[in-house]
Amino acid sequence: MSEVLSESPIYPPKENVKPISQISSLDEYKNLYNFSINHPEEFWAEQAKRLTWFHPWENVLDDDFSEADVAWFSGGKLNVSHNCIDRHLKDKAEKIALIWETDEPGEAKTYTYSQLKHEVCRIANVLKASGVKKGDCVCLYMPMMPELVFSMLACARIGAIHSVVFAGFSAESLRDRIIDCGCKVIVTANESKRGGRCYPLKNIVDKAIQGLTLVEKVFVAKRTLTEIEMQPGRDLWLHEEVQKERRSCPAEWMSSEDPLFILYTSGSTGKPKGLMHTQAGYLLYASMTFEYVFNYHPKDIYFCAADIGWITGHTYLVYGPLSVGATTVLFESTPLYPDPGRYWEVIEKHKVNIFYTSPTAIRAVARFGKDYPAKYDLSSLRVLGSVGEPINPEAWKWFYETIGRGECTLVDTWWQTETGGIMITPLPGVTDMKPGSATLPFFGVNPCLVDDNGLELTENNTNGNLCIKKPWPGMARSIYGDHQRYVETYFTQYPGLYFTGDGCKRDEDGFYWISGRIDDVINVSGHRLGTAEIESSLTSNPLVAEAAVIGIPHQIKGMGICAFIVPSVEASSFSVDEISGTIKQQLRNDIGAFALPDQLQIVKGLPKTRSGKIMRRILRQIAIGEHEDLGNLSTLAEPNVVDDLIKQLKTR
Ligand code: WTA
């Protein structure tokens, strides 16, 4: 990273966005930034005018940050779906809200704001009729289809909390999430379609809720023509139910701090956590960051390629764009289907102006060279965005030059499920771009670097643990049902600060360079996985005695999974292929196919300290072939294990 720092080229802000920039110069950014930090209440009170309130708020901020007890705009009443739909109907009823680009390239389906309202209200009425009330949690396990967006907004409309579960998760993971937030109602689809293949979503739901009396209703959207089994009394076709309902539904008055949604994410320990976001602060932050970071203007066509199953899809495919009345593209397919030109085809076809994706996706298409992008007219693009993992300078440059033709602003946006919205990012027309750096904090965001003892590193040119000092409106308020865990996970490591889990450098210009997770979280293709979560699945298999999982660099995915397992006595009658096949199946069942290891090493023993702690540092070094100097091994219980490991891996 230090080489990158000293050699990093600087790309000055683009002129073509300047006339239409929300902020026109670095000085203006600095002034407003300083104001937002020194006078947060005044700053956010002014910004809160972006939202439509049913009843005005009383206090901008009540907080006890160190206890993670934070309330924004208390006393206020509003409705998120009203803010994302109804308030646009006066002058944008016929504007396209959603463009659905289906898996098979063909005719895209569009929905105007007025149609969006009807679709959302009918689903809201279906949910209400099935007994869903304000404060109930509804699980959405769906493909990237419009009914997913409608269902999220339908929940928001009636005050229900949605919990979207990424459709790549297994039945077991889905079951855990349904139980954790007590969902009585699930919305799913018969199948999902991706990359020319169909996946049996409803079957997975059936498995997930087998024997669960908690679940009363399963609504099934019809994505394909495939027949499925419907359990009478429990399962209903969504398209049949909406036919019975009215196209209007009153928007519930919600308090600013009522929950809006739960989204599960992995951490270093234990089961995935259901992070809870609330109404007003989240929406305000989503809305403002969307407009400023992407230099959004009312005629723009905006395309975020993220899956709605993750936070990027929540904030920047649905809530941010719809809150400002934008046209947002919902993309069902993959960057490689039917060929690696798919993104560019979509951009040409819809004349996309703003395109937001991940480094993994960029690397996946960059492998195929410049021929695919060259076939399409990409001149509509003005702003490109990257999120989810550190972007390596090569991928940055490819994106900037090949896709942006050197004429677009590229915003490398750092944020997390927990932060609700973008926290560190360039602003188009304002900030210098340095490939690999997320650059400077957004308004109201107060980052700091601390050393391992929690001492703040105030100088530039330093490396430390990235923390946030003050509350911001988009922050998650809790872990659903376990506030203590929220406090312990994020607010106790460095008292008084929110700890992000990321390592970071601040360079001589005060620019932030996120280097990645320093806890036991692996970011695989931008999907967050806890090593503990994978290990617990591995060790639950009778063929496995011990397991250790580490992240290793991966050319396309950013990080890959390397799993070391020590077979159990029972495994002695199985071949290596049989063991690894069983283990992979176990991971597929427990988590999902995206948790399969890139390297599975079946070994005799793991390096441990005398107190039994696995020394992951050593495993990491061995896995990447840097075992010449393994540093201090004196704390190892059995130093021979290391030699055996090296020998074993070398002979493969
Ligand atoms: C990583 C995704 C470097 C980081 C919105 C963070 C990044 C985790 C960037 C959150 C970036 C996200 N540069 N690293 N621009 N953006 N990350 O919760 O490690 O899925 O902690 O949220 O992704 O992942 P999550």
Image (cartoon, rainbow, N blue to C red):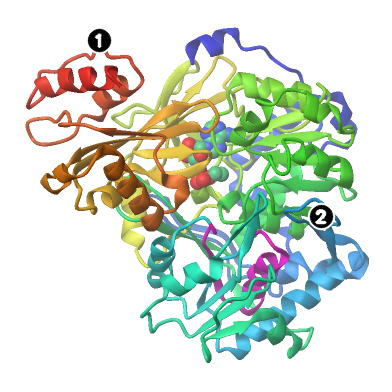
**Which residue is denoted by mark 1 in the rendering?**
629
- Residue 524 % position (x, y): 48, 38
- Answer above or below: position of 486 versus 17: below
Residue 413's image quarter?
A: top right
In the image, taking residue 170 as reference, residue 623 lies left or right, namely left
Amino acid beneath label 1:
Asp
Residue 429's image quarter?
A: top right
The magenta segment: 143-167
Q: Secondary structure at mark 1?
A: loop
Query: 114 or 640: which is nearer to us?
Result: 640
Question: What residue do we see at 60% from left, 57% from top?
Answer: 282
- Answer above or below: position of 621 versus 483: above
Per the image, is 164 magenta?
Answer: yes
Q: Secondary structure at mark 2?
A: loop
**Cα distance between the residues tagged 2 and 1:** 55 Å
- Answer above or below: position of 264 versus 528: below
- Residue 482 % position (x, y): 34, 63
Per the image, is 551 magenta?
Answer: no
- Residue 83 % position (x, y): 74, 66
In the image, taking residue 189 as reference, residue 468 lies left or right, namely left
Number of on-image labels: 2
| Whether the residue under disc 2 has CB within 8 Å of ligand 1 | no
Please give the label number shown on residue 326: 2
